Image (spheres, grey):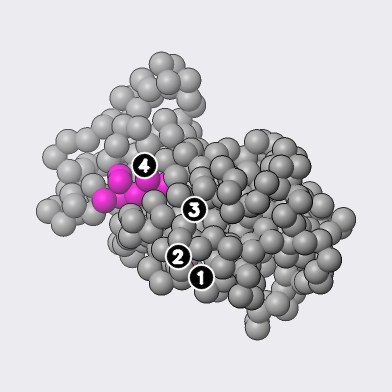
Amino acid sequence: MKVIDSELMKAYARMAMDGFNQGWHERNGGNLTYRLKDSDVEELKDDFKEDGIWEDFGWQAGHESDSSFSGLAGEYFMVSGSGKYFRNIQPDPEDNVAIIKLNDTGTKFMKVWGLKKGGRPTSELPTHLANLDVLKKRDEDIRIVYHCHPTNLIALTYVLPLDERVFTREIYEMATECPIVFPEGIGIVPWMLCGGKEIGDYTSELMKTHDICVWAHHGTFVCGRDFDETFGLIHTAEKAAEVLVKVMSITNVKRQTITPDQFRELNKPFGVHINEKFLYEKKDGTIGQMPEE
Ligand code: 13P
Ligand code: ZN
């Protein structure tokens, strides 16, 4: 089967276009990685060219440190190209996407398909692979990592405290479904130089327990088992962020909201355990207040 004709490629390209249509992928913003199943490799391998060169991960200036992803050794990944525009993925996947393979120690990669006019995988590959490495240990079925630039979540990183408890709680209060979709909350990564190992390591530490992280003043990372789940997660969080931005454009004090006990009511019927660290008591309706220590 040609990669270009596969259901996998269609689903990947559809997600890229969905994200673009949401306004989350200006210019070359964002990147998307899918860890192939054995059955995907079996289906597509006749279209792979496995005689290329092995390349290092630390190719970018300022990011010379070597990375190693031993937990992903020998695996294949569909990745967006660095500098490629998400709006161009669906019309021409072969020019904008690559499939790469990691070597037996997880220290180098080889392009086996795509990026037909040249180029490299996304500059955020170290973060994607660091995340996929810890996620695979958490749940073998989590195979997608998606980075985008959603406007409202980014806007909130300028006005809410960069504190996971506060950020998550304010988002939770904007949509009942949020704590059901991400009961472990939103991990916060303070501003750091993107594209390197340091931000990759920091993010992947949070991804050991979270499905969604915000990079302050930059964007978000989410993970999932399939494209629907992954897109649905960031779509839900960004919708709640949009409601919060609208509320904050009217007032910084809420007249009424969802209470901690009301959140607790969700646990049993929805089969979740909303982390209690987000359900602290508030003094009043002021948005963004820190919990009392
Ligand atoms: P790439 O074009 O290298 O994927 O980078 C886009 C981006 O969003 C960087 O954070
Ligand atoms: Zn980015």
Q: Where residue 275 sits in the image (x, y, percent)?
A: 48, 33
The residue closer to the viewer here, 85 or 49, is: 49
Label 2 amino acid?
Asn
Label 4 amino acid?
Thr
Q: Where residue 22 sits in the image (x, y, percent)?
A: 33, 55
- Left or right? Give the position of 73 relative to 270: right
Q: Residue 13 — which label?
A: 3
Q: Residues within 10 Å of mark 3 (few under 14, many from 20)?
A: many
Quick check: is 73 in the magenta stretch? no
86 lies above or below 235: below
- Residue, disc 2: 88
- Residue, disc 1: 84
Q: Where residue 211 sits in the image (x, y, percent)?
A: 53, 43
The residue closer to the viewer here, 53 or 261, is: 53
Mark nearer the viewer, 4 or 3: 3
Q: Residue 105 — which label?
A: none
> Do the numbered discs 1 and 3 sit on residues whose CB atoms are within 8 Å?
no
12 lies above or below 138: below
Q: Is mark 1 within 8 Å of ligand 1?
A: yes
Say which residue appears at 27% left-offset and 40% top-offset: 174
Say which residue appears at 31% left-offset and 25% top-offset: 262
- Residue, disc 4: 236
> Do the numbered discs 1 and 4 sit on residues whose CB atoms are within 8 Å?
no
